[in-house]
């Protein structure tokens, strides 16, 4: 299974985050010069720091038990960057700057007595950057789809984001998050409608406010718990499969030995 292969692979490389510690933030530069297309983005830098499956999991002295890559997706202006900043740095800025390319931050949390390092990627939501976004589904353990409860269109577009997930990493864990849930007079996406939709697609729904720090910590912690549980279930399935294969080999070896003994009998 795809999920088993993902969770049973070595963790993501820490070559980048080890240099600066808690968090990192990168932006690809716009192309310059007459050959540039309007809105084009130079992506060679981005590709150079895409996490890869490496040897770091076997490094001595690591301060975590599990390393997960989480991806935050959704339309522009729904508050993806604000959710990431609130969870990783406990900060919020009302001065909105559209994310170009991908940022990521690191935070380590404790789940059921185990240390879990989260590498959380914040992607650009604009349609013109969709090809950049798709690159970062690789080796992802969990996807957070964000919509704005004050913007019904962003909720309608959740279906499109779910379709994109299914095309890139269908077996990944995912949740749906309605952000900006801090002013009832501006709310246009009903909680019950969101819950019914979540049930229909098998995705858990949270409502948050990065601005007022409402339910952000709870959402990320609950999702981390879901991803950790999925990993352990995957490892359990893999172990059972190895035991079955071992038993099959053992049975076949006995049969082969019995056949050889029968073939040696004298006439």
Image (tube, helix red, strand yellow):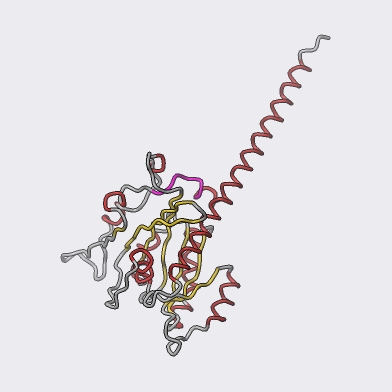
| Quarter residue 196 falls in | bottom right
Vertical relation: 191 (above or below) 118: below
Residue 94 percent coordinates (x, y):
29, 78
Q: Nearer the viewer, residue 211 or 231?
A: 211
Residue 256 percent coordinates (x, y):
71, 24
- Judged from this view, the residue extending furthest toward the front is 113
Which span is picked out in magenta?
Answer: 7-12
Instruction: Give the residue drawn at x 47%, y 68%.
Output: 219
Vertical relation: 156 (above or below) 237: below
Count of marks overlaid on the render: 0
Q: Quadrant of the C terminus?
A: top right
> Is most of the magenta stretch helix, strand or loop?
loop
Describe residue 46's horizontal placement relative to residue 170 as left or right: left
| Quarter residue 124 falls in | bottom left
Q: Nearer the viewer, residue 105 or 65?
A: 65
- Judged from this view, the residue extending furthest toward the right is 267
Vertical relation: 149 (above or below) 117: below
Residue 49 percent coordinates (x, y):
31, 53
Query: Within the magenta stretch, is there residue 164?
Result: no
């Amino acid at each position: 299974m795809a999920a088993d292969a993902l969770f049973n692979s070595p963790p993501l490389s820490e070559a980048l985050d080890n240099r600066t510690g808690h968090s990192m933030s990168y932006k690809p530069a716009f192309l310059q010069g007459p050959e540039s297309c309007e809105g084009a983005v130079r992506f060679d830098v981005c590709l150079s720091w895409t996490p890869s499956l490496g040897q770091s999991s076997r490094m001595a002295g690591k301060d975590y038990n599990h390393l997960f890559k989480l991806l935050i997706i959704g339309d522009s202006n729904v508050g993806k960057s604000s959710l990431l900043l609130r969870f990783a740095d406990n900060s919020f800025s009302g001065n909105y700057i559209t994310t170009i390319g991908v940022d990521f931050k690191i935070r380590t949390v404790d789940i059921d007595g185990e240390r879990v390092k989260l590498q959380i990627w914040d992607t650009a939501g604009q349609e013109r950057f969709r090809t950049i976004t798709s690159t970062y589904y690789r080796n992802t353990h969990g996807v957070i789809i964000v919509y704005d409860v004050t913007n019904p269109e962003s909720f309608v577009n959740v279906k499109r984001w779910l379709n994109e997930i299914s095309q890139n990493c269908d077996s990944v864990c995912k949740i749906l998050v309605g952000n900006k849930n801090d002013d009832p007079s501006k709310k246009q996406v009903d909680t019950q409608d969101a819950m019914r939709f979540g049930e229909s697609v098998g995705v858990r729904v949270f409502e948050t406010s990065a601005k007022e720090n409402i339910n952000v910590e709870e959402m990320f912690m609950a999702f981390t718990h879901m991803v950790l549980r999925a990993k352990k279930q995957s490892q359990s399935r893999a172990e059972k499969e190895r035991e079955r294969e071992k038993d099959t080999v053992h049975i076949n070896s006995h049969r082969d030995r019995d056949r050889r003994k029968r073939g040696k009998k004298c006439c």
